[in-house]
Every structure is written in structure tokens, then in C-alpha cells.
Image (cartoon, grey):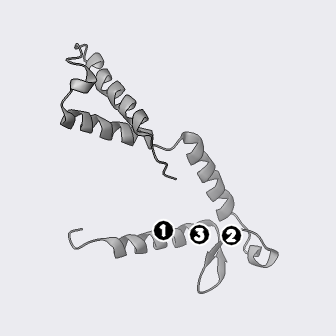
């Protein structure tokens, strides 16, 4: 899930990363952040946005647990009711390695359709 990141937080994080780059090298910070050239500030803003957009480990663990639960569903789940991985138009419930292969094939198909001529 991607969240909008408050620009003020990005700016503070960018400045902190910038300052840290000098401190790690044991160099004095050359100028106040607001006086730093804009292209340099933009580079550190990009670093900050990237760092702030990394999902929390807890979110990834929860996603992994959900997927493990989903891929282990019984094949009769469609008759018994509940959540499952399904293949259409065949109307089949898939699980385990079959679910992994079906998902990998679907991802691959989408990627191959979205590749441009240069890729």
C-alpha cells in the first residue's frame, strides 16, 4: 500500500540524510540546508521519499502470513464458502504450488503486456 508522504516530513528527512552524509565522513556541514543548491536538495529529497516509502516489516510479515493462509486453503473452499485463490474462467480453486504457479504466470503475463518496444 502506498501512502502520501507529508512534504514537511520529506524535507526534514532529506536534511537529516544530507547532514548525516557529512557527519559520517567527519566533515563539517558546509552551509545551512536552506542555502544548499536546489539540485542537491532534490537529490536528498528523493533519498528521503524512498526511505519513507519502505513498508514496515510488520506489514510485510502480515502480508506473508495472509498469503500462506490463502495458499493453504482446501480445494473444497468454493463449495464450503470462504476466501480462496480462484482461476477463471475455469472456476477452479487453486492452492499450494499450483497457486504459486498461477500467480507467477499472471504476473508474467501482465509484465509482458506492459513492456514497451525498448524493453
For residue 80, above or below residue 3: below
- Between disc 2 and disc 1, the foreground one is 2
- Between disc 2 and disc 3, the foreground one is 2
State left or right for residue 82 relative to residue 43. Answer: right
**Residue that sits furthest to the bottom in the current view:** 89
Mark 3 touches mark 1? (CB < 8 Å): no
Q: Position of residue 114 (x, y in %)?
A: 34, 72
Q: Position of residue 42 (x, y in %)?
A: 25, 38
Q: Residue at x 33, y 27 (%)?
A: 15
Kindly identify which residue carries mark 1: 104
Pick whichever of labels 3 and 1 is earlier in the sequence. 3
Pick whichever of labels 2 and 3 is earlier in the sequence. 2
Work out whether residue 45 or residue 54 is closer to the camera in this orientation and state it.
45
Q: Residue at x 24, y 16 (%)?
A: 29
- Label 1: few (<14), some (14–19) or many (≥20) C-alpha neighbours in 10 Å: few
Question: In terms of secondary structure, where does tag 1 sit?
Answer: helix
Give the label on residue 35, or none: none
- Label 2: few (<14), some (14–19) or many (≥20) C-alpha neighbours in 10 Å: many
Kindly identify which residue carries mark 2: 84
Q: Quadrant of the C terminus?
A: bottom left
Q: Residue at x 65, y 81 (%)?
A: 92
Mark 2 touches mark 3? (CB < 8 Å): no
Question: In terms of secondary structure, where does tag 2 sit?
Answer: loop
Kindly identify which residue carries mark 3: 99
**CA–CA distance in space, label 3 to label 1:** 8 Å
Question: In terms of secondary structure, where does tag 3 sit?
Answer: helix
Work out whether residue 30 or residue 27 is closer to the camera in this orientation and state it.
30
- Label 3: few (<14), some (14–19) or many (≥20) C-alpha neighbours in 10 Å: some
Amino acid at each position: 500500500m502506498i501512502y502520501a508522504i507529508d512534504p514537511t516530513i520529506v524535507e526534514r528527512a532529506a536534511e537529516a540524510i544530507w547532514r548525516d552524509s557529512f557527519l559520517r565522513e567527519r566533515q563539517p556541514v558546509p552551509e545551512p540546508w536552506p542555502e544548499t543548491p536546489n539540485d542537491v536538495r532534490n537529490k536528498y529529497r528523493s533519498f528521503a521519499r524512498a526511505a519513507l516509502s519502505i513498508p514496515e516489516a510488520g506489514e510485510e510479515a502480515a502480508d506473508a502470513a495472509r498469503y500462506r493462509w490463502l495458499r493453504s486453503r482446501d480445494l473444497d473452499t468454493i463449495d464450503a464458502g470462504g476466501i480462496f485463490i480462484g482461476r477463471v474462467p475455469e472456476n477452479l480453486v487453486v492452492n499450494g504450488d499450483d497457486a504459486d504457479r498461477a500467480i507467477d504466470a499472471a504476473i508474467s503475463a501482465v509484465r509482458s503486456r506492459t513492456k514497451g518496444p525498448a524493453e
